[in-house]
Structures are given as structure tokens and as C-alpha cells.
Image (cartoon, rainbow, N blue to C red):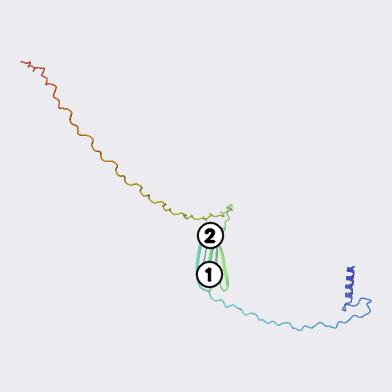
Amino acid sequence: MYAKVTMMCLVAVALARPDKPAPPGGYGYAPSTPTYAPPKPSYSAPQPSYSAPAPSYEKPQEGMPFDFQYAVNDQYNGLDFDHSSNSDGKVVNGQYRVLLPDGRTQIVTYTADYNGYQAEVTYEGEAQYPEPQPYKPAPSYNAPAPSYNAPAPSYNTPAPSYNAPAPSYNTPAPSYNAPAPSYNTPAPSYNTPAPSYNAPAPTYEKPKPSYG
């Protein structure tokens, strides 16, 4: 019911607009004529107020003369290249050489001046394509650095807690005397014995001679 009432109100408002003609058959009145006109623009398109910028650069000046040369030959890592160049301040002439992964040597000879950079590229040697070797990853760790320091000694040489003991004794005094002699020199108890034998008489005679 509410939807029907809303729709009827919208239709009535649309039919009541003065800029729309009355529907056929009308309602017995003529549509009103609008009494206003759209305003005319009161401004004009702005004129450009800028000009082309002047160039902010100057004519290039001559450079400083130079001359250098260097070379690198690292057989362990497979690096071999060199570069030399010189300039009189107007024209730069140079050449660099580099060992390519395929075994050839690339040589670039160049000239640079106000007209630009011009290079000539040549190659030495013959390209080689060896069979790929199996991949061996390098170790991703390093030997750890020690994270400790040698401990400093936390003790000192102990001081002696005792003193040399004082002697508790004295030199003993002698408790004896030299004994007195208890004997006398003995008198001799014997006499010189008299001899009890005589000298024996000879029992043999002097032999007589037995020759004539």
C-alpha cells in the first residue's frame, strides 16, 4: 500500500513540472513559459604568460689531460683484465682487455670526444665449452672464534699464619761429677823364680878319624 502511494506522488510531481507539456487531454490549463535565460560567460580564456625557457647549460669546456693504466691477473679466481687510457683534454683514447668465461679475450679500443663514444670490439682465441663439473657447495661456516679469555688468577700467595716457635728448653746442666778412683796400684805378689834344672852333660864322644 505504501509503495502505491509513493508511486502516485512521483507521477503527480512529474506531471506538475512546468517544462513538460501537459499530457494529451490536459488538465484545462496552459503550461507556463520560463522567465529566465542562462547567464553568459563573463570571462575570457587566459592568455599564456610564459615563454620558452632559455638554455641553462654552457658550451662544454675542455677536460683535464690524463694518462693511466692498470692490470689484474688472478689465476686462482680466473680474473685477467687490463685497461689503459689517455687524453689531451679534448679526445680520449683507450683500450681494455678482459678474459671471457669461454676462454676468449675481448679487446675494446675506443675513442671519445665531443662527437660521442666510438668503440671497436675484437676477440682473441677460440671459444671453448668444457663439460660442466658437478656442483660442490663451499662450506657455509667458519671455525668459531673463541668467546672466552683465559681466566685471571683470583688468588694471591698466602701469607704465613705462623711464627717460628721459640725454644722451650735450656741447655741442661750436667748432673754428675767425675768419679774418684776406688783402687790402688797393686803390689807385686810374686818373686823371681830360681832355675830348677842343671845344664845336661854331653852324652857323646868326639869321633876318631878312620883313615890312615
Closer to the chain start, of discs 2 and 1, is: 2
* Mark closer to the observer (2, 1): 2
Q: Quadrant of the C terminus?
A: top left
Q: Provide residue 104's location: percent of width, then percent of height.
A: 55, 59
Q: As displayed, is residue 182 above or below residue 81?
A: above
Residue shown at 56% from the left, 63% from the top = 122
Q: Provide residue 59's location: percent of width, then percent of height.
A: 57, 77
Q: Provide residue 64's location: percent of width, then percent of height.
A: 51, 73
How would you rate the neighbour count of disc 2 (Cα within 10 Å): few for under 14, some for 14-19, many for 20 or more?
A: few
Q: CA distance from mark 2 to mark 1?
A: 24 Å
Q: As displayed, is residue 194 above or below residue 98?
A: above
Compare residues 60 and 174 and report the one nearer the observer.
174
Secondary structure under badge 2? strand
Residue shown at 51% from the left, 60% from the top = 73
Residue shown at 89% from the left, 73% from the top = 9
| Mark 1 lies on residue | 93
Q: Provide residue 191's location: percent of width, then percent of height.
A: 15, 27
Q: Identify the amino acid type marked 2.
A: Leu
Compare residues 113 and 198 and report the one nearer the observer.
198
Q: As displayed, is residue 23 above or below residue 183?
A: below
Where, by quadrant of the figure, is residue 37 drawn? Answer: bottom right
Residue shown at 55% from the left, 71% from the top = 112
Q: Is residue 163 left or right of residue 34?
A: left
- Numbered circle sitting on residue 167: none
Which residue is at the far bottom?
42
Compare residues 162 and 48 and report the one nearer the observer.
162
Compare residues 82 and 16 and report the one nearer the observer.
16
| Mark 2 lies on residue | 79
Q: Is residue 108 left or right of residue 50?
A: left
Q: Quadrant of the N terminus?
A: bottom right
Secondary structure under badge 1? strand
Q: Identify the amino acid type marked 1.
A: Asn
